[in-house]
Image (cartoon, rainbow, N blue to C red):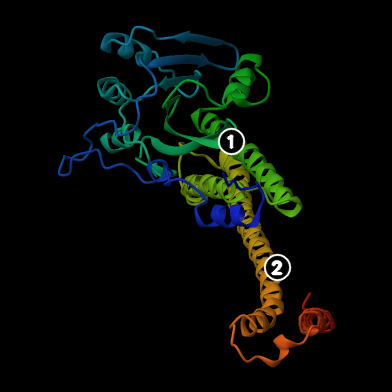
Amino acid sequence: MSHQVPGSVSHMVKGALHPFKPLRIVGRIVRRASKPPGLPPGTLIHTGPRRVEVPRIEVIRYSPEDLRESGAEDLSPSRLREVFSERPTEQEGMLWVNVDGLHDVDLLREIGEAVGAHPLAMEDVANIGQRPKAEDYGDHLFIVVHMLRAEGQPFRIVDEQVSFFVAPGLLVSFQEQPGDVFGPIRDRLRAGKGRIRGQGSHYLAYALIDALVDQYFHVMERLGEQIESLEEDVSDRSPADTMKRLHHLKRELLLLRRSVWPLREMMGALLRVEGPLMPDSTKVYLRDIHDHSYQVIETVELLRDVANGVRDLYLSQVSNRTNEVMKFLTVMASIFIPLTFIAGVYGMNFEHMPELAHSWAYPVVLGIMLAMALGLLAFFRWREWI
C-alpha cells in the first residue's frame, strides 16, 4: 500500500492545488436577501440568525450623584413604556437601555415608538449586515458599528452588528446576543470616576464606540500572531496544511476588512453633525477615534500584504522543490538515455554482430557505458547543473 509522507513535494503540490474545502465565508460577508422585495420602507423584518431564545433588556440610569441598574424581564408594551417614560433630561442625567436579541420585531417596534426612532433606523436595526454608518435624523442620531471578537482555534472572527440610538438624555444600544466589550464602560459608570457620569448621551456614545474600536486592535493582534506563526512554519518546514491555514486567515481578513473599512466614513459623518446631539466638546474625542480608524485600516491592509507574501513564499518553495526533483530526474534520464541506446543496439540479436564473437566484448561495452555515465556526471558537475 502506497502512502505519502507529510511534507513531501507531491503532498505540498496537492495542498497547493486543493488547499481548502468550498468557501463558507460568503454567508458571513454577503448580506442575505431574506427580506421580500417591494415592502414599504421601515418594514421590520429580522434578516439575521436568531442568537438568543428570549431578548433581554438592561437599563442603567445615572447622574453625577447616582446610578441605578435593573433588568426589564417583563417585555410587555406597558413595561417598555414605563421604562422610557422615566427618561431624564440632559441636565438630570442619562438613561442607557441595552437590548440583547433582535429577532423579536414586535419588541423592536415598541422600542422605536417609545423613543421616537425613525422607522428607517429601526429597519436597519433588524436587518443584520449593515455597513458601519452614522445618520442624523434631526432629533436623534442612528449609528451602526460592528463588534468583533477573536475566538476558537483555528482562529475565527465573530462579527456582530451593534446599533445605537442617541437622543438627549437617552442612548439605546441593540446587540444580537449577550456578551460585549462594554464591561469597562459599565465599571467606569459604577465607580463614578472620570467625566462619563457628568456627560450626556453623546459622550456615552463616544465611549462605547471607542471600546469597539479598541477591540479591533486586539483582534488584529491575534490575527497578526497567526500570520507570523504561519510565516515561521513556512520558512522552517512548509507543513502540508499551509495553504489551508493561509486561505482561512485570508478569509478572516476579508471579514475584518469589510467590517472596518467604512469606519472612517462613519466617523467623518459624526464629526459633521452640528448641534447638541454632538457638541464640539465631544468631537475632540471623536477625532481621536477617527485617527484610530485610519490606523485600523492601514493595519488591515498591512496584514493582507503580509499574508500575500506568505502565500508567495510558500508557492515559491513548492515550485523550487518541484524544480529540484525535476532537475534530478532529468539528470538521471540524461545519463541513462545513451546507456539504454547501447543496450538496445546489442539487444537486437542480429546473427552477424562482430563484437559478439570476442570474449572481451562484454566487459568492454560495460566499461564504455560506465565511462559515459561518469563523463556525463562530470560534465553536469562542471556546468554546475548538479
| Viewer-nearest residue: 110 or 254 | 254
Circle 1 SS class? loop
User: Which residue is at 44% across, 20% downward?
Assistant: 97
Residue 26: give its label.
none
**Residue 197 visible here:** no
| x and y, in percent, of residue 321 in the image | 68, 63
Residue closest to the eye, 340 or 65: 340
Residue depicted at x 60% and y 35%: 215
Number of numbered tags placed on the structure image: 2
> Is 368 rendered above or below residue 31?
below
| For residue 227, side relative to residue 77 (left or right) | right
The answer, for residue 27, to whether it is visible in the render is yes
Residue 190, position as x, y percentages in the image: 62, 14
Q: Position of residue 184 (x, y in %)?
A: 63, 23
Circle 2 sits in a helix, a strand or a loop, which is it? helix
Instruction: Report the residue marked by disc 2.
Output: 324
